[in-house]
Amino acid sequence: MGAVMMNPITLFLAILFALAGGFFLSAGAVPVAAVLFVIAALIFFSLKMANQWEKYVVLRAGRLQAVKGPGLFAIIPILDSIAVVIDERIQTTAFNAEQALTRDTVPVNVDAIIFWRVENAERAALAITNYRQAIERVSQSSLRETIGASHLAVLLSDRQAADAQLRDVIGKKTEPWGISVLSVEIRDVAIPEALQDAMSRQAQAEREKQARVILGSAEAEIAAKFVEAATTYADHPAALQLRAMNIIYETTKERGATILLPTSMLDALNPKNRN
């Protein structure tokens, strides 16, 4: 709700007519000066200007007369009054819920922000006393309701769904006041430190379990390859000899390397000795 401020156009015109009245008064033309002074007073109290984003709710004798703006407009002094100035730009309101219990009885602290704007200035002015305060209270209560109906895992992993649910719930409550909820964003979900440690250990255990499964699968594949290689070597002894010689060659490539081989192995590599 904005405050009614004197606009420069009204102030300029009022001063202009007042100066003209003073000029005629000094010249002795009292009736003309009086008329000019009255016009200056009427302009000062009746001519108003609303900015592009503003709506002026005008009451006449206590009853709704009109919603004015944007631009220049006039009211009847004394009889008319401006009840409230409504800002129709997008507004933001931060709210939170402390120690709210989730559906699985976990206490959490949640911070969120709501983006909203006034769609109907008349209802926002007449249907509720303070729509800004009401939006904050409704947002807090709706956030607690959403937390109580959700599991902790859902709040942590699927915030977009929680944001959409909050937007719909708050929007239904504020619609009769002429307020439109554009979006709601959950900024932070804080959980107790003890639970954080437990969740961290659980995540680590899951990662270790997955690593062991992958390692076991790799070892099974390697063992299958070893069996396949052993079968090939059994059917082709020459391949085994070539493999053994390749291993010896790879080992002796480094300078200064000394290889000690059992005589039985050398005999095994010699086809004549095998026969």
Image: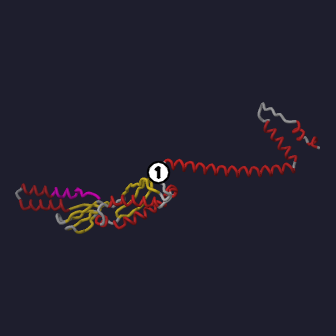
Does residue 138 appear anywhere in the picture? yes
Q: Is 182 left or right of 206, judged from the image as shown?
A: left
Q: Is residue 200 above or below residue 79?
A: above
- Label 1: element kind: strand
Coloring scheme used: secondary structure
Q: Is residue 151 above or below residue 201?
A: below
Give the residue drawn at x 80%, y 32%. 258
**Coordinates of residue 188 in the picture (x, y in percent):** 45, 52
Tell which residue pokes out farthest to the right in this image: 275
Give the residue drawn at x 19%, y 62%. 46
Q: Quadrant of the C terminus?
A: top right
Does residue 53 appear anywhere in the picture? no
Tell which residue pokes out farthest to the left in this image: 28
Give the residue drawn at x 23%, y 69%. 63
Residue 193 part of the magenta segment = no
Q: 98 and 68: which one is in front?
A: 98
Tell which residue pokes out farthest to the top in this image: 256
**Coordinates of residue 194 in the picture (x, y in percent):** 50, 48
Q: Based on the displayed image, in which of its 4 quarters is residue 90 positioned?
A: bottom left
**Coordinates of residue 141 in the picture (x, y in percent):** 39, 60
- Please state the extent of the stretch shown in magenta in the rendering: 1-16
Give the residue drawn at x 17%, y 58%. 14
Q: Quadrant of the N terminus?
A: bottom left
Which residue position holds label 1? 190
Name the kind of residue labelled 1 in the image.
Ala
Q: Is 255 left or right of 214, judged from the image as shown?
A: right
